[in-house]
Image (cartoon, rainbow, N blue to C red):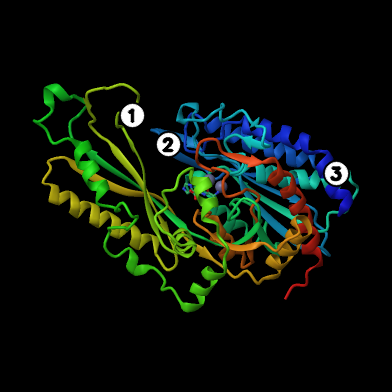
Amino acid sequence: METFFSFVNENQDKYVEKLREIVGIRSVSSSANYRPDTIRMGEWLIAELERLGASTKRVEPGTQELEGATVPLPPVVLATYGTDPSKKTVLIYGHYDVQPALLSDGWTHDPFTLTEDEKGRLLGRGASDDKGPVLGWLCTIEAFQKTGLDLPVNIKFCFEGMEESGSVGLDKVIIREASDYFKDVDCVCISDNYWLGTSKPCLTYGLRGVSYFQLSVKGPAKDLHSGVFGGTVHEPMTDLVHLMTRLVDVNGKILIPGIMDQVAELTDQEKQIYKDISFDIQDLRGSLGSETEIYDSAEDLLMHRWRYPSLSLHGIEGAFYSPGEKTVIPANPIGKFSIRTVPNMDSDKVTELVCDYVKSEFKKLGSKNTVDVWCGHAGRPWVSSPNHWNFVAAAKAVETVFGCKPDLTREGGSIPVTLTFEEALHKNVLLLPMGASDDGAHSINEKVDRRNFVEGIKLYGAYFYELAKVAEE
Ligand SMILES: C[C@H](N)C(=O)N[C@@H](Cc1c[nH]cn1)C(=O)O
Ligand SMILES: [Zn+2]
Ligand SMILES: [Zn+2]
C-alpha cells in the first residue's frame, strides 16, 4: 500500500481544501432556516460521488414539522461504487448534518470557516462529526483511482442529513432497501465516533442509545414584567427549574424511579474488561478542560460513560439568556434534557417512567400552571462482539497504518441507525473512528487533527485491502 500512502501524504492539502468547502455549508439539521443548506450538502455529496464514477440514488424521506412549518427532510444519499461479484461489498454509513454552532457560543473563529492552527488542528463545525470522516471515504476512492490501484472491495454508501436530529425517516429507508439496494452487502462500517484518547486508534463495538425529552410549563398568555406581576402569579420558570432539579442529582444519579432497574447487571467477566483497558484520566481532563470528573478510577469513569445511563440537562427554550439584565417572567419556558440509555433499557418504558414522574412531581408543586412532557426522539443502545472478521480486518489495518493494536471500546454517544443496520441486514457493523477524544464534537472549537484526517484516509484504504484478504467465517 506504499504507493497509496505516499499519494495520500502528497495530496493532503487538497483534502483539507475539500473539507474547508463542506464545513462552509451550514448543514444544521435542527434548524428550519438551515434546511436548504442541509439539502445542499446532500447534493454536494451526490455530485462528488458521481464525479468519482459512483452511481447514486437520491431518496427523499418525506417532510417534517419544524419550527411551525412543514419542511422537506434532507435526502438520504445512496451510492454504489463497484459491482464485482468476486469482491466483498462493504456498506459505509455517515452523516452530513451537524450540530448548531454560533461564534457567540465561544468559538475562537467562525465555526463554518475551517481554520488550521499552529498545532495542525482543523477547526470547524463538523470537522470531526462527521464531515471529515465522510469526506475521508471519498478521498480514499479518489486516491485508489489516481494511483491506478484496483479497489479491492465494492462499496455501498448511505449518507444521511438528520443524524443529529433523531435520524428522522432513515429507519424506513434502510428496512425497505435491506433486500434491494443493500442486498449484496457483506459488512457495515461507520466512522462517526472518537478514539478513547488522543494517540491510539480504536475499534468500537457498543453505543449508548438516547431518548431526548422536552418539558414545557405554561402559565400567562405572554411574557410579563416581573415588577408588575412578580409575587402575584405562579411563574412557569420557577416550576420548570424545580422539576429539572428533580431529574438528576449533582453526582449524576438519575432520580426517576425505575430507570436504573432496567440496566443490565454487571458481570465479573465484564468487570475484567474494564480493568484491562488503559484509560488516562489526564486525557479526559484534557478534553474537559477541567478536573471536575465525578469518579476517581478509570474503570468507574468508563463504566459510567459506556454501560450505565446518564441524564443531562441541555437548556431552556423561551427563557431569557442574553447578556444584560432583562426583568421578565417567561410565559412558556421549555426544558430540554436527554437520557443516554444502555442495555437492557426499553425506550417506551423510559418515556413512560419519565412522563409519569414529571407529572407527579409537578402535582406536588401545587402550581396553577400546566405541564407537558414528551420524548422528541429515541434511539436504542447497541452492543456487538469485536471478534467478527470485519473487526479483524480493521485491526490489521490499524497495525499497518499506526503500528499498534487498536483499543477495543464502547462509546458513550449514540448512533441509533447502527442497530437498525444490524437488524435489517443481519450483517456485522464495525465502528472505525477517525477523530480523537479531544475533538470537541458538539462543543465549541470542534476540530479534527490533520494527522487523524490524513492517517484516517490511509486507514480506510488499508481496511478495504484487509477486508478483501480476510476469510469470512
Ligand atoms: C456519536 C455521534 N457522532 C453523535 O454525535 N451522535 C449524536 C446523536 C444524536 C441524537 N440526538 C441528537 N444527536 C449524539 O450522540 O448526541
Ligand atoms: Zn454528533
Ligand atoms: Zn456524528
Q: Give coordinates of residue 273: x percent, y percent.
A: 54, 71
Whether residue 192 is situated above or below residue 327 in the rendered picture? below
* Disc 2 to disc 3: CB gap under 8 Å: no
* Quarter of the figure with residue 251: bottom left
- Mark-to-mark CA distance, 2 and 3: 44 Å
Task: Report the residue marked by disc 3.
Answer: 7
Q: Residue visible at 79% across and 59% down?
A: 400
Mark 1, secondary structure of its residue = loop
Q: Give coordinates of residue 212: x percent, y percent.
A: 39, 49
Mark 2, secondary structure of its residue = strand
Q: Nearer the N terminus, badge 2 or badge 3?
A: 3
Decide which of 312, 331 is in the foreground and name it: 312
Decide which of 101, 78 is in the foreground and name it: 101
Q: Is mark 3 within 8 Å of ligand 3?
A: no
How crowded pointer 1 is (Cα within 10 Å; few <14, some 14-19, many 20+) is rated as: few
Q: Nearer the N terminus, badge 3 or badge 1?
A: 3
Decide which of 310, 373 is in the foreground and name it: 310
Task: Report the residue marked by disc 2.
Answer: 66
* Quadrant holding the C terminus: bottom right
- Mark-to-mark CA distance, 3 and 1: 50 Å
- Mark-to-mark CA distance, 2 and 1: 22 Å
Which label is found at residue 321? 1
* Quadrant holding the N terminus: bottom right
* Disc 3 to disc 1: CB gap under 8 Å: no
Whether residue 392 is situated above or below residue 162 in the rendered picture? below
Residue found at the far left of this picture: 232
Q: Give coordinates of residue 56: x percent, y percent.
A: 71, 45
Residue type highlighted by circle 2: Leu
How crowded pointer 3 is (Cα within 10 Å; few <14, some 14-19, many 20+) is rated as: some
Q: Residue visible at 22% across and 36% down?
A: 237
Residue type highlighted by circle 1: Tyr
